Image: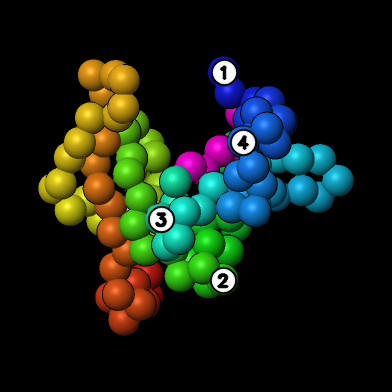
Amino acid sequence: MLQVLAVAEEYADLCLLKKIHVFDDGIVKGLIHLEGTEIAELYVDHFFQNQGIGAALIEFAKKKYHSDFLWALEKNVRAIRFYETHGFYVTGEKKYESGTIERLLLMRRRPAREESVLSG
């Protein structure tokens, strides 16, 4: 079980804070880590899942930082569906997550024109 605050505290020591954006409405509920236009990580504390926090973070990244790709764990079907809902698609490109036997799938953002057709 991953808790957002523990992850945020870990990053404080790594000088990554300029790349981390936190969903905080008085309580830290989620965070997104951006590397250029890549969504490197997206976490929502399990206590606050299914409340629109992940959606708010990903839409923030798309609008403000033009985020257009990410890597998702192949076995995390729920996350893949979530990203697809927000305009990303599986490209077919795969790689192993560093130090594991888990495979990651590259997901790219659909062009804005395609997103609006699919959501409308």
Q: Which residues are magenta?
A: 41-46
For the residues labelled 2 and 4, the Cα–Cα distance comes to 23 Å
Residue occupied by mark 4: 14
* Residue 25 seen in this snapshot: yes
**Mark 2 or mark 4, earlier in chain:** 4
Q: Amino acid at mark 3?
A: Glu
Residue occupied by mark 1: 1
Count neighbours of disc 3 (C-alpha within 10 A) and say few if under 14, some if 14 to 19, many if 20 or more: some
Callout in the foreground (4, 3): 4
For the residues labelled 1 and 2, the Cα–Cα distance comes to 29 Å
Q: What is the x, y in percent for residue 12?
A: 70, 36
Callout in the foreground (1, 3): 3
Residue occupied by mark 3: 38
For the residues labelled 4 and 1, the Cα–Cα distance comes to 22 Å
Residue occupied by mark 2: 64
**Mark 4 or mark 3, earlier in chain:** 4
**Mark 1 or mark 3, earlier in chain:** 1
Callout in the foreground (1, 2): 2
* SS of the residue under disc 2: helix
